Image: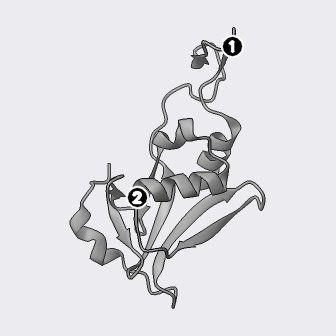
Amino acid sequence: TPLVNSERGGSQRSSSSLTPGLQVHLYFVPRTKNSVTIHISSGQTSAENVCIKAGEECGILPVYLSLFGLASADLSFWYPPSHIFDSDENIKVHFRVRFFFGHWFGQGSRASYRYSLTRDRISPVLDYSVIDYLFAQL
């Protein structure tokens, strides 16, 4: 499991872009069905806010955002939600699914389900946007 280490931010500088700012690699965007890199260059922003923006771009519902996080460019560590990115820095991160569990896809006799109080039926634990994204990042 990658370690969270906020001291390593300097080792993740990106030289692939001439414009300063945070580059966020998204593995799957539904409207293009491809991976894209979005640029965030508006002052200081937290990793949590970056995840919210990335989730909106990828069609991930807010209820599932806690499964996602920002990984370093070399995938060696995760940025904590409280990490502050500065627009003067030139850093590339990956928006990735961090957690999943056995029988999460809903197949077989031991499938996991989610029960909703507002609906009188069970439903799969993850929706298709999360499943599509997970398979794209693998």
Residue picked out by circle 1: 119
Secondary structure of residue under mark 2 = helix
Q: Disc 2 marks which amino acid? A: Ala
User: How many numbered discs?
Assistant: 2
| 50 to the left or right of 131 | left
Q: Is residue 119 above or below residue 107?
A: above
- Mark 1 and mark 2 lie on one chain; the one further toward the N terminus is 2
Which residue is at the far bottom?
A: 18
Residue positioned most to the top: 120
Query: Which of 74 and 124 lies nearest the eye of the viewer?
Result: 124
Picture residue at 60% right of the left edge, 12% below the top: 117
Towards the viewer: 56 or 72: 56
| Residue 4 makes an appearance in the image | yes
User: Circle 2 sits on which residue?
Assistant: 47
Residue at x 52% of width, y 67% of height: 24
Kindly give the residue lying farthest to the front in the view shown: 43
Give coordinates of residue 109: x percent, y percent.
Answer: 63, 13
User: Going 56% across and 41% down the picture, which residue do you hit?
Assistant: 62
**Residue 129 x, y percent position in the rendering:** 68, 43
Provide the secondary structure element on which disc 1 rests: loop
Residue 69 in the image, given as x and y percentages of width and height: 44, 51
Side of 49 relative to 106 (left or right): left
Q: Residue furthest left?
A: 7
Residue type at the position of mark 1: Arg
Q: How packed is label 2: few (under 14 Cα within 10 Å), some, or many (20 or more)?
A: some
Which disc, if any, is residue 104? none
Label 1 crowd (10 A; few <14 / some 14-19 / many >=20): few
Q: Identify which residue is drawn at 74% across, 54% down.
A: 30
Q: CA distance from mark 1 to mark 2?
A: 33 Å
Q: Is 136 situated above or below 39?
A: above
Can residue 138 be spotted in the picture? no
